[in-house]
Image: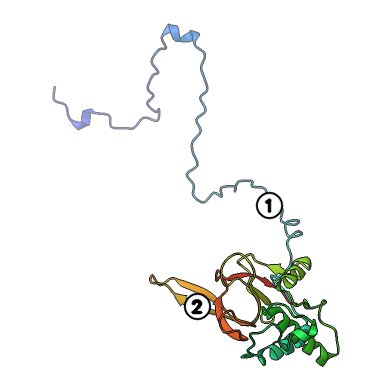
Amino acid sequence: MLVTLDNIDLSVSDTPLTEEEPPKPPFLDAIPEQVITETVPNDDPTEEIPEPNIPEENTENNTEDLPDEVPEEEPQRARSEASVEIITEFLSVAIEQEGYYHNGANTKFTGNFDYNGPDEWSAEFLSWCIGKTGEKFSVQLGGDMFPWSDSVTDFFLWFISHGLFDDSGEFIPWGGDYVFLDFDLDGLIDRVGLVTEVRTVSTFDLFGKPTEETTLRILCGNMPKSKKIERFDLTVNDPSVMGFGVIN
């Protein structure tokens, strides 16, 4: 038989084609159907992600214990205007005596004490200067603002008793302070001098490291070799420096 298109029905049926579900095996009837819920991650970049709940730091009371301004460091020491005026005059009187020479038991400075003792008159010289300074201001300075004696040991004990002696090795004196000297390095005070100037020099070592050296200009009576009142320089940490008497 010849098959042609005229013999074939090309019309579309309104009944949809359905695929028959295969029969369920009998052993599956005993297994209940389970509902599986799958969580699908949200890949939508437009959705806002909530920020983590981090408690805010309570700063209300944190500033209560903090000062409004950092206080300036207080200076080591201070001198009043009246004190500066007296010390300036004291230094002037003492420096005027530079070059005075005496090699006997008595000097023009010993008359204040009626003393005919040995010729280590460095303490007598400073006491004499204190007397002259007090006369200008019509005040008694010896024993109050300054030690007053013909003895280096008395000077030392006066500063100790007033809490004004410093041998820490870190103290930097001011002009008008006393310096106790041990020239022969036997551990005993030989002379008492007066600091007239303090200079700090910045230098560099061989490796370029900056260093500072403090030099003192000292005025002292009855120098061991010359028996004069002389001014000379020593570094603040020189072995002959036993300590300082602080004048405020």
Task: Give residue 248's position: percent from left, percent from top.
Answer: 75, 77
Residue 70 seen by the camera: no
Dividing the image into 4 quarters, which one contains the N terminus? top left
Name the spot of residue 89 as percent of width and height, x first: 74, 90
Q: Given contact means CB atoms under 8 Å apart, are the residues at marks 1 and 2 in contact? A: no
Indicate whether 141 appears above or below 35.
below
Say left or right for 230 vs 42.
Answer: right
Distance, label 1 to label 2, CA atoms, is: 49 Å
Q: Secondary structure at mark 1?
A: loop
Looking at this view, name the residue that lies furthest to the left.
2
Q: Residue placed at 38% from the left, 15% from the top?
A: 22
Q: Amino acid at mark 1?
A: Glu
Q: Amino acid at mark 2?
A: Ser
Q: Give the camera-side residue of 71 and 31.
A: 71
Q: Residue at x 74, y 65 (%)?
A: 67
Task: For marks 1 and 2, give the one nearer the viewer.
Answer: 2
Q: Residue at x 67, y 48 (%)?
A: 55
Determine which residue is flagged by label 1: 57
Assign a secondary structure to mark 2: strand
Residue 232 appears in the rendering? yes
Please say if 220 is above or below 8.
Answer: below
Relative placement, left or right, of 236 versus 126 is left
Count how many numbered circles sit on residues in the image. 2
Label ID, residue 36 = none
Residue 131 locus on image (x, y percent): 79, 86
